[in-house]
Amino acid sequence: MKVSHQMLNIAKFICFCFLTTVIHFANAQSNFDSMSGSHPSFSEILSFRVDSVLNLMTINEKIGQLVQYSGGWDATGPSSSENHQYKLSKLKKGEVGSMLNVTSVAAIRETQQIVMENSRLKIPLIFAYDVIHGYKTIFPIPLGESASWDLEIIQKSASIAAKESAASGLQWTFAPMLDVSRDARWGRIMEGAGEDPYLTSKIGVARIKGFQGGNLNDKFTVAACAKHFAGYGFGEAGRDYNTVNIGDYELHNTVLPPFKAAAKSGVATFMNAFNDVDGIPATGHRELQHDILKGKWNWDGFIVSDWGSIGEMIAHGFAEDKKQAAEIAMNSGSDMDMESYAYEGHLAELLTENKITESQLNDAVKRILKLKFELGLFDDPYKYCDETRERENVYTKEHLKIARDVARKSIVLLKNENKTLPLSKSIEKIAVIGPLGDDKDVPLGNWRGKGVYNSAVSLLEGIKNKVDKNVQVSFAKGIELMSETVEPGKNQFLYPIKFNTKDKTAITEAVELAKKSDVVLLSVGENAYQTGEGRSQVNIGFAGLQNELIDAVTKANENVVVVLMNGRPMDLSEINKKVSTILECWHLGSQAGNAISDVIFGDYNPSGKLPVSFPYDVGQEPLYYNQKNTGRPYSMDHVTFSSYRDAPKEALFPFGFGLSYTNFKYSDLKLSRSEISKDGSLIAKIRVTNTGDKVGEEVVQLYIRDLVGSLVRPIRELKGFEKIKLKPQESRTVSFEITPETLQFYTQNKKWEVEPGTFQIWIGGDSKASTTAKFSVQ
Ligand code: NOJ
């Protein structure tokens, strides 16, 4: 009998439906089965399910799974632009694997329906969005949140972001960003955990756990994405998208560890990067993606390109055209093409020319299908589409309460020389002054997801919410920071910002208010869109007319508390000379003003520590504590030493630094052994005492130095930390286990090894800690 192609497809499809149903039941049974020992494991069943779909797919359908489009869909459907019509036709054919930027249950359902009702195999789409520091309840920017050094609260904030996203129909976030960055000029420094690979690894894993929960199948979790693989934080001169020139040693010892930790923790996806690494664009970097991530680390998720980064290999001068770009990306292990249109346009042709293989294609498709199965999308493509769930789980009171807690834990007290803080709640006249003092939008930060314009609690509101009715709280803006603001409703993300450099008229009013107030809360810093993607700056001081305002106000009143709101380490050297109190408040999210007032009035004792060094001058950048000693370490007395003639070499406020309203004393550092073997361990113990009169939290930090190595080793490296809470006069002994993992590094043998020799450790409250001891490894 002659069977038509169509009949064959129908038969295949019936078979597919049957199989997936059977496998669904098999899944449910898997616990019982694995107990009996004679049945396939969960991962075998999963891979069987994936193969059952793959076997039904045509080449075009397979290629389609590797395509990701950006939406712009809303509840009323796609706009009528040509590009949208094209995307719509591809969706109907089942030749799209994923959409980004389609948000809300209604829009996601509508888009999913296009595929489910029109395509042959009905393979559900996966919906992604940049949920970086909250979906609608906005948390502090990641750099700020990292200042909490509180892994539990960081995980919690990611889990709420996941809950709100998943309740709104999404299944995948492009976070966390794991790019170690040492350059304050780089706008995206706000999106990571700062300059240290150890801290970035720990925080990255906490965020992944928060997003993914224990189970991707849960209705309130989303898949995470470790990005940008790799080196993106090292763009030359802090310029975004710029070339990266780092050697193998730096790559392995500094850049890759957070990614390795993410892969190990089971992060579902990776994103590659826009930059080249020593001449090879990350998107076409086979060694990074194919050999290291998927090979050596044996990671089984999929890699999505960054936006258009496959096509950008043409501009890099690494590919002649999109076809060659697609070939290079595919052969390097890049699985999904975000908005380059390179895979859909050229993979079929490349296959017939044997420039890529079908088994490569299958591998990429399988990785993507696997995640769709894990998320439960094959069981129910509308699983995340429930309006009631959306209504009940987004921007809830409970989430806002936690956002406030995360925000206050992220604040860093940089200076409190005259013990001005905490303020008494019965102080008579408080002035809030400055362009950010009543701002309800800036605290939301740059990557604010679905955060609503002007929805944050401003500093002024926060102060008013806190004090007694008889306290006089007055406000004077002094200056406008910007000369133009982007109309609400427009995507501010895309517009350059313009500073006001002319209109100073309101400074006089601010000075008058400062003169008659008991204390001034001077709110200055950066607009939300001074940091983030494409927001690199050579000036990391106070833009616009802020310096003039600072000057005038600090002359008018001695009791000024600087309330900084910013997304990068700023140059604070001038303001530091003028004031005795500085509170680093980042862009703290929806509850910013309330969180800041909690700290200002002592309802919360600040416990944040800088995850990044604050310089004396932009000329010091890149600046980081874990630098190498050089052959000519710093000396003030000699010219021919590694130093600057016009500025210190060190940070103004170092990594790990942050004050409290109480004090902590470190004593009795003891090592359990003074000598260990290469695979041995020892315990370092230290006594920490709260010597003040307030309950406080301290981040106890362990640093090591390998004094002589086969490669030059950093002068200090963070290798452990613990956040503890102590009552007044209470002491606690904190222990750190020093294991081969603590001591190893990527050596000249190109292996992770512990080298024999002497090690020095320091334990204390910042990277300048002075309590020290030595031991040796035989
Ligand atoms: C480009 C950014 O580099 C990346 O981090 C982001 O996830 C994508 N755009 C998607 O918005």
Image: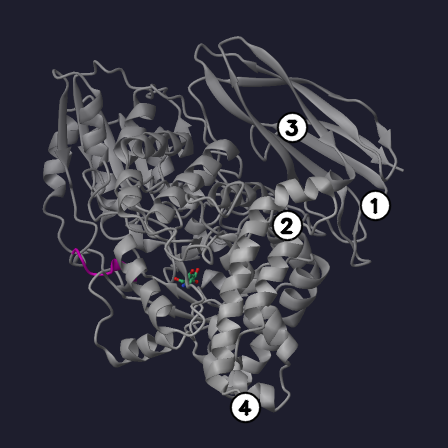
10 Å neighbourhood of mark 1: few (<14), some, or many (≥20)? some
Residue 42 circle label: 2
10 Å neighbourhood of mark 4: few (<14), some, or many (≥20)? few
Q: Position of residue 144 (x, y in %)?
A: 41, 41
**Residue occupied by mark 4:** 2
Q: Is residue 490 magenta?
A: yes
Rendered image coloring scheme: one colour
Quadrant in the picture for the C terminus? top right
Query: What type is the residue that disc 4 sits on?
Result: Lys
Q: How would you classify the magenta stretch by its main secondary structure?
A: loop
**Residue occupied by mark 1:** 755
Q: Position of residue 405 (x, y in %)?
A: 37, 29
Tell me if residue 395 comes above or below residue 50 in the rendering.
Answer: above
Query: What type is the residue that disc 2 sits on?
Result: Phe
Q: Is label 3 in contact with label 1 (beta carbons under 8 Å)?
A: no
User: Which of pointers 3 and 4 lies earlier in the amino acid sequence?
Assistant: 4
Please say whether residue 698 is visible from this viewpoint. Answer: yes
**Residue occupied by mark 3:** 763
Q: CA distance from mark 1 to mark 2?
A: 41 Å
Side of 155 relative to 287 (left or right): left
Q: Is label 1 in contact with label 2 (beta carbons under 8 Å)?
A: no
Side of 480 relative to 38 (left or right): left
Q: Position of residue 16 (x, y in %)?
A: 52, 67
10 Å neighbourhood of mark 3: few (<14), some, or many (≥20)? many
User: Which of pointers 4 and 1 lies earlier in the amino acid sequence?
Assistant: 4
- Which of label 2 and label 3 is nearer to you? 2
- Which of label 1 and label 2 is nearer to you? 2
**Which SS class for mark 2?**
helix
Q: CA distance from mark 3 to mark 4?
A: 79 Å
Residue drawn 26% across the image and 81% down it: 82
- The residue segment tinted magenta is 488-493
Name the quadrant where ligand 1 sits: bottom left
